[in-house]
Image (cartoon, grey):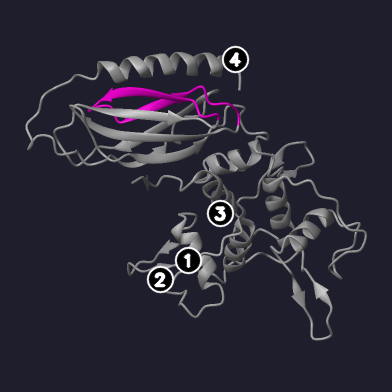
Amino acid sequence: MSAWSAHRRVAGAVVAGLALTLVPAVTVSASAAVAPAPPSSVRVDRSIPPVQGEINITWNASPTSDISEYQIISTYEDGSSGLDYRGAGTLQYTVQGVDPGESVDIEVRSLRSEVLSEPATLRATGLDSGPAYNFTDVPGNTFSYEIAWLSSRGITTGYVNPNGSRTFAPSAPVLREQMAAFLYRLADPEYAAPTVSPFADVPTSATFYRQISWLYETGISTGYVSPSGVRTFAPSAPVLREQMAAFLYRYDGTSATSEAQTFVDVPTTATFHRQIEWLAAQGISTGYLEPNGQKTFRGGQPVLREQMAAFIYRYETGPFGQNMWVS
C-alpha cells in the first residue's frame, strides 16, 4: 500500500467514525421506518478516465422517493474501510486511495433517517498505474477498460508492430495457446515445466510450452486423444465460447451444477451445460439478447480477445456493471 493510500484510509476511518456518530437520530413513526429500496446498477463509470488512486462509480436512484442521502462504504483488500455520505441528488462517487491492481468492495445504500436499505455492491479493480501498454487499436472499444485492466495485470502484452507500437487485436479469436498464457499469468504459479511434452503437437521449444503444460497438469485442459492414443493440444486453433466456459470452470475448481437453462441454445443435455450455467450464474457472461427477446450463448462461436478480457475481468472482480446483492 502506498503511504498516500495509508494516510487517506486512516483519515477515512476517523471521518467514518465521526459520520457514524453524527447520523441524525431522528424519531420516525413505524410507517415511516420502512427501509428504502436499494440503489440499482452500481457500476464503474467508464466515461471518466481512471486517475491514479481513484475509481469512479455511478448508480441509479432508488425507486423509493423519500431518501435523504446515500451511504457509501469502501472495503479494501487489507481490511480497512472508508465511509461517506452523498445527497439524494448525487448518483456518483469517487473511491480514493486504491493501490495499483487492488480490488475494492464498494457498497451503496439508500438512507432515510436511521433506516438503511440492503446494499447494492460492486467489486472493482483500480487502474492506478495505468495500462501497462497503450494499445493503438483499443481506444473507443466497448471493452477498453477491461483490456486496460488485463494489460495492467500483466495478463496480456498484445502484439508489437514494426514501428514499436502495440496492438491488442480485440476482434481476433483467442487461440488455445493464448488461452493457456492468459490463465497461467492470471494464476501466476510457481511451476517448472516437464522435460517431456504431454502433447505431440507442442514441442518443448514452443513459445507457450510451459503454460500449456501447466494447463494440462492442472486438469484445465487434457487436449484431444486420437483413436491411436496420440494426445494433441491444437495450440493454433481458436477457443470456442463453450470451451472457454469449461476452461474457466476448471480453473476455478468449482463443482457447481444447475438444472436451469439460461440460454435457449444450451439445453440441459448440452456437453458444457454445467459450465455455461456456472458462467451465467457468476455474472461472467450474459450471452446475447436476440431480436426475439431470447438469450443465446453461441457456444460454437470462437471467443474474441475483447470478450476474453471482459470474462477474465468479471471472473476476478465480479460482474461488470451489474449488481451483486448482499443479504
* Disc 1 + disc 2, Cβ < 8 Å: yes
- Lateral position of residue 68 relative to residue 16, left or right: left
Q: Nearer the viewer, mark 3 or mark 4?
A: 4
Residue 227 location (% of width, % of height): 79, 86
- Lateral position of residue 163 relative to residue 96, left or right: right
Q: Earlier in the sequence, mark 2 or mark 4?
A: 4
Q: Is residue 49 above or below residue 124?
A: above
Identify the residue shown where x is 37% and y is 35%.
Answer: 107
Distance (Cα) linking label 2 and label 4: 48 Å
Dot 3: element: helix
Distance (Cα) linking label 3 and label 1: 17 Å
Quarter of the image where one finds residue 132: top right
Distance (Cα) linking label 3 and label 4: 36 Å
Name the disc covering residue 277, or none.
Answer: 1
Q: Is residue 167 magenta?
A: no
Q: Categorize mark 2 by other alpha carbons within 10 Å: few (<14), some (14-19), many (20+).
A: some
Which amino acid, by three-letter code, is at mark 1?
Glu
Q: Earlier in the sequence, mark 3 or mark 4?
A: 4
Nearer the observer, 75 or 289: 75
Dot 2: element: loop
Which residue carries the number 2 mark? 260
Quarter of the image where one finds residue 134: top right
Residue 178 location (% of width, % of height): 72, 55
Nearer the observer, 178 or 67: 67
Which residue carries the number 3 mark? 307
Which residue carries the number 4 mark? 3
* Range of residues picked out in magenta: 78-100
